[in-house]
Amino acid sequence: MDTKSTDKRVSLLHYIVATIRQNFPELLNFDAELLYIDKAAQVSLENVSADVCELERGMEAARREAESRAHSHAHAHVLRDFIANASDKLRRLRAETKHAQDSFAMCVEYFGEAPRSCDANAFFSLLVRFTRAFKQADAENEQRRRLELAAQQADNVDPNKAKVVQKKQQEAVINELKTKSQSVGEKKLLHQDEVYNGALEDILHGLRSEPYRRADAVRRSHRRRINSHRLSKGLEELDV
């Protein structure tokens, strides 16, 4: 139970329970054969044996008392009747105790333990904890299986929906890039009537004198040269 996966979510017991459910489902209800392990975990077999020995010593004392008063006491027959009835019960109790000790020794040896070093209380408490952990692991496996199945069904409801959403996102990104590219191109291009001889030198001079300007603005020096060029061209045409 302490051996777990790297994510600490699945233990060795989870794997064992899953294997049993898949290959040996008839073994899942093994606890139905262990009806009284809860009570057995609360009883010490050594204490039971000690109590039986104490009863035997008390019965032997009662016999001696009955023999000593057999002829001198008027109510001696009451003690003799008690001894007769209790002796039979004590013999059955002794036989059942011996059977319990032998059965426990066989059970402990079956699980690879030494009967003398293993107490019944500790042994059955271990079985109780294992049974509860087994049932809990089975319930957790079933819950995990239902969650995985629900996730798969959710993914398979509309397989094309995710593709449509992804395609729309890609188209939105492409349109945004196109818009930005056109905006940058418009900012970099000059109007046709603004191009003349020496325009490149004016642009470089303007960049050095005014490194920052609005995207839709034209530098004043650039505008003055354009106006001067147009005026000179108009005067030449008039002279002609």
Image (spheres, rainbow, N blue to C red):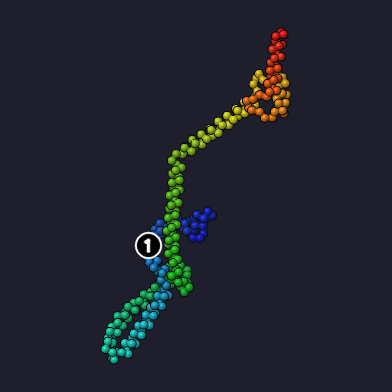
> Can I make out residue 23 in this image?
no
Residue beneath the point at 62% across and 25% down: 216
Q: From the viewer's perspective, is residue 2 above or below residue 194?
A: below
> Can I make out residue 85 in this image?
yes
The image position of residue 25, as x and y in percent, is: 40, 56
Image-quadrant location for residue 34:
bottom left
Sort mark 1 into few (<14), some (14-19) or many (20+) by Cα contacts within 10 Å. few
> For the view shown, which residue lies furthest in the top direction?
240
Secondary structure under tag 1 reads: helix
Q: From the viewer's perspective, is residue 111 above or below residue 163?
A: below
Looking at the rendered structure, the number of numbered marks drawn on it comes to 1
Image-quadrant location for residue 103:
bottom left
Q: From the viewer's perspective, is residue 84 above or below residue 221?
A: below
The image position of residue 72, as x and y in percent, is: 29, 91
* Left or right: where 93 falls relative to 171: left
Residue placed most toward the observer, 157 or 197: 197
* Left or right: where 65 falls relative to 173: left
The image position of residue 202, as x and y in percent, is: 71, 23
Residue placed most toward the observer, 240 or 32: 240
Look at mark 1 in the image and give the residue it sits on: 32
Residue beneath the point at 44% across and 63% down: 129
Residue beneath the point at 66% across and 28% down: 213
The image position of residue 182, as x and y in percent, is: 60, 27
Residue placed most toward the observer, 192 or 60: 192
**Quadrant in which the C terminus appears:** top right
Amino acid on which disc 1 is placed: Ala
Residue beneath the point at 55% across and 33% down: 173
